[in-house]
């Protein structure tokens, strides 16, 4: 059937793990009984972040003992072609302030390609997921799912853009080009974190981008955006390996956005279809 893929069993497993972690993180979110520390990069991490990653790792070790794991809080363990990539809580700054926009991100990278992604946002009562070749969906469970499809918006003047933070553009360069892009679109909002990209997959936002984003922040988002018909690359148009920065669009707007963000972009680097 059109929803099955070679990674269907891995997708099912990611849902089962997300169900367990959702219960755990929701209890902590509601109670707000958190111990919050500041990392060397001055960002907050709570004991709910580390507990969530520990329980995901424990379940993976039990049922997928041969797979490697990369997580935000505990780094990289194991090696091999299959690697689970975890962001136990994406949106920690929201989580620790009682804002419901946070999610657990679980991805499987196989031979370098993000092939499974589950984004579970229990405080929003939302989940988004995809497996390569099997489509992208939203709903509360595999059984209750709606297929995701990006928008058909074809001009910047009609486009909605979402980002997370402005910091980073200055260091990367291109802050002016980004601000010009926000002037050119119909609407700009900072929905933030995973949410910008899930909204692209839903067709509610057309462009999401970020100058600083790690692999664990985006691995789950790549199959969700691409299986919904969108495109996910780096800010200068490279289709993986992922990590560093990110641009996701409804595909139609991708080349136009790349041109605006990279005024010096070599036309020859574009495929004929993109020129
Ligand atoms: C953060 C979010 C945010 C991005 C930051 C990340 P966290 O993740 O993904 O959108 O701009 O760079 O650190 O710490 O809330 O998982
Ligand atoms: Ca963090
Ligand atoms: Ca994150
Ligand atoms: Ca995190």
Image (cartoon, rainbow, N blue to C red):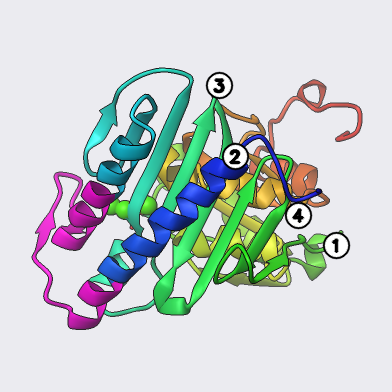
The segment highlighted magenta reads: 26-55
First-in-chain label (4 vs 3)? 3
For the residues labelled 4 and 1, say whether their Cβ atoms are less than 8 Å apart. yes
- Above or below residue 152? Residue 5 is above
- What is the CA distance from the residue labelled 4 to the residue labelled 3? 25 Å
The image's mark for residue 250 is 4
Horizontal and vertical percent position of residue 24: 26, 67
Q: Is mark 3 on a helix, strand or loop?
A: loop
Please state which of the two labelled residues, at mark 3 or mark 1, is closer to the viewer.
3
Q: Which residue lies furthest to the top in this view?
A: 80
First-in-chain label (3 vs 1)? 3
- Mark 4 CB lies closer than 8 A to ligand 1: no
The image's mark for residue 235 is 2
For the residues labelled 2 and 1, say whether their Cβ atoms are less than 8 Å apart. no
Which is more toward the observer, 19 or 118? Answer: 19
For the residues labelled 3 and 1, say whether their Cβ atoms are less than 8 Å apart. no
- Residue at 41% in and 47% down: 168
Residue 2 shown left or right of residue 66 in the figure: right
Q: Is mark 4 on a helix, strand or loop?
A: loop
- What is the CA distance from the residue labelled 3 to the residue labelled 1? 31 Å
First-in-chain label (2 vs 3)? 3
Please state which of the two labelled residues, at mark 4 or mark 2, is closer to the viewer.
4
Q: Is residue 29 magenta?
A: yes
Q: Name the residue under label 1.
A: 152
Quick one: label 3, few (<14), some, or many (20+) residues within 10 Å? few
- What is the CA distance from the residue labelled 4 to the residue labelled 1? 7 Å
First-in-chain label (2 vs 1)? 1
User: Residue 22 lies in what quarter of the image?
Assistant: bottom left
């Amino acid at each position: 059937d059109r929803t099955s893929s070679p990674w269907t069993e891995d997708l099912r497993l990611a849902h089962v793990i997300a169900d367990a972690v959702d219960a755990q993180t929701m209890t902590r979110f509601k109670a707000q009984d958190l111990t919050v520390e500041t990392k060397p990069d001055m960002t907050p991490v709570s004991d709910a972040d580390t507990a969530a990653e520990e329980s995901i790792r424990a379940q993976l070790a039990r049922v997928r003992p041969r797979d490697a794991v990369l997580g935000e809080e505990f780094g990289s363990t194991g090696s091999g072609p299959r690697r689970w990539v975890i962001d136990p809580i994406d949106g920690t700054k929201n989580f620790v302030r009682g804002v419901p926009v946070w999610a657990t991100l679980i991805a499987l990278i196989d031979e370098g390609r993000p092939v499974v992604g589950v984004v579970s946002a229990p405080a929003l009562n939302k989940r988004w997921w995809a497996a390569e070749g099997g489509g992208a969906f939203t709903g509360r469970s595999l059984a209750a799912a709606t297929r995701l499809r990006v928008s058909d918006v074809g001009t910047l003047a009609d486009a909605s853009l979402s980002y997370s933070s402005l910091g980073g553009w200055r260091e990367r360069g291109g802050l002016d080009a980004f601000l010009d892009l926000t002037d050119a679109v119909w609407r700009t909002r900072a929905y933030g974190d995973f949410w910008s990209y899930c909204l692209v997959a839903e067709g509610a936002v057309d462009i999401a981008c970020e100058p600083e984003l790690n692999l664990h922040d985006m691995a789950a988002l790549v199959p969700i955006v691409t299986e919904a018909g969108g495109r996910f690359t780096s800010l200068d148009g490279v289709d993986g390996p992922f990590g560093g920065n990110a641009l996701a669009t409804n595909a139609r707007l991708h080349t136009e956005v790349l041109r605006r963000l990279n005024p010096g972009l070599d036309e020859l680097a574009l495929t004929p279809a993109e020129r």
